[in-house]
Image (tube, rainbow, N blue to C red):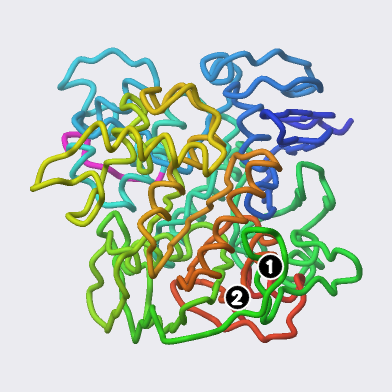
Amino acid sequence: MTAPPVLALRGIRKRFGSVQALRGADFTLAPRELHALLGENGAGKTTLMQVAYGLVRPESGEIAINGVVRTIASPRAARRLGVGMVHQHFTAVPALTVAENVALAAGWKVRQGLLRERVREFAEGAGLPLDPSARAGDLSVALLQRLEIVKALASDARILLLDEPTAVLAPGEAADLLRVVRGFTVRGGAAVLITHKLDEALAAADRVTVLRRGAVVFEGAVAGQSAKSLASAMIGDEEGGEARRPRTANRGRDGTVAEVELHDVAIRLEDLEVPRETGYGLAVRGASLSIRRGEIVGIAAVEGNGQRELLRAVAGRLQPLRGRREIAEPVAFVPEDRTTEGLIPGFTLTQNVVLGSRADDPWIRRGRIDWRLARSRTAILLEEYGVVAPGPDTFASALSGGNQQKVVLARELARRPRVVVAENPTRGLDIRAAEAVQARLRGAASDGAAVLIYSSDLDEVLALAHRVLVAARGKLLEVPADATRAQIGQLMVTGGR
């Protein structure tokens, strides 16, 4: 008799506001299997595994562990059923030691001498040796990733869900980690590997499932698949694959199409090298790029390929290690996370607009802030940008995500920037709010700014940009002018290989 799947998700549906994250998704994990889960950014991969781990409650569908339907209402309940998850972002407490972090995750008693020896033996037995006395905050990225897996295994996990575990690792480190995961399956465990690296999935996995826009579009054995076939499943091909980006037209603020006049270069990068934000390794390698005023250039990339560091280097938030960088001032920066980088939620809208003020801002008088004038100017911006808020003294935390994003745009664009850098500017916004943000970016270009944008939504990049570059493994690749959506997607996931 064939053994049932160790994990089965059937008909899983989940909506976040206006976004349908999962559309009746199915997934099965067999005993002793390493199963790759693929898909574009926002396809629903992480959400599906968070359902299995009890972090997200589905609206419909069922979860079965070893053939028995279960209700998994929390990560603690998942761990009791033998499910462990290694998250994309590290969860270790920096101030605690390795041993203390493992004990915290696994519920072990903290008896320092015994605990350290227990953690040392456990980590070595798992093939992931660690110094139990080391502070987590002092570990390298590779060792932090190792710690995350040890934490999951210490809870007696028999099913391991790994969300982009190799995204920040060097090739040799990634290969070592995958060997450990394969060893885990050989010893009787089963693992799910969420990854954007197709060569990694092809080399390591037994089976593969591909999600697109919250639905499963392919499931089967890795044998017989190629990077090209998996990329096609991930990206799809809308309307015969002929969706192309605009070449020389840009929509103005009134929605009409106008020819763009391309003037002098406002962004010039030559052989730029930028470190990862963690300080470990290079994120951008030998990047060269020129953007003229009135031009919108879009970056297409899967997460972790250096686009974040590139945008921050252009915006002056990260210092390159070497290379030439010439950026026209002033620069507007719209960060990905509006609540931690774009705004201070506990400040009023006026206070947030005043953040980052320059000496020539109208509310600065002899080095002091004229708060009455600042409130008046904020009220005008709220009306001009269609921000739904009671007034300029409203706290930013009281606004919806779309209105918060409009405030960020209002503050940045009101300064008449010569360069605009926007990172995932419509992430989490509904259609109407997203269209308003896109219109503002087009308007900034029409007013003569050079606009550099990255979006995890390839369709948004294609809709906005005059030129598209792909960031892959820290390199910038120029996309041919007649490239289709599918061809751009292929470059994103293969890096042109």
Q: Which residues are drawn in magenta?
A: 127-134
Left or right: residue 96 versus residue 3 is left
Position of the C terminus, as image quadrant, is bottom right
Quadrant of the rendered image containing residue 21: top right
Which label belongs to residue 462?
1
Left or right: residue 263 versus residue 319 is right
20 inside magenta stretch: no
Which label belongs to residue 25?
none
Which label belongs to residue 468?
2
Residue occupying image coordinates x 43% and y 55%: 413
Which percent across, then down, holds residue 74? 56, 16
Q: CA distance from mark 2 to mark 1?
A: 8 Å
Q: Secondary structure at mark 1?
A: helix
Q: Secondary structure at mark 2?
A: strand
- The answer to whether residue 497 of the structure is visible from this angle is no
Badge 1: few (under 14), some or many (20 or more) residues near its Cα, within 10 Å? many
- The amino acid sitting under disc 2 is Val
Quadrant of the rendered image containing residue 371: top left
- The amino acid sitting under disc 1 is Leu
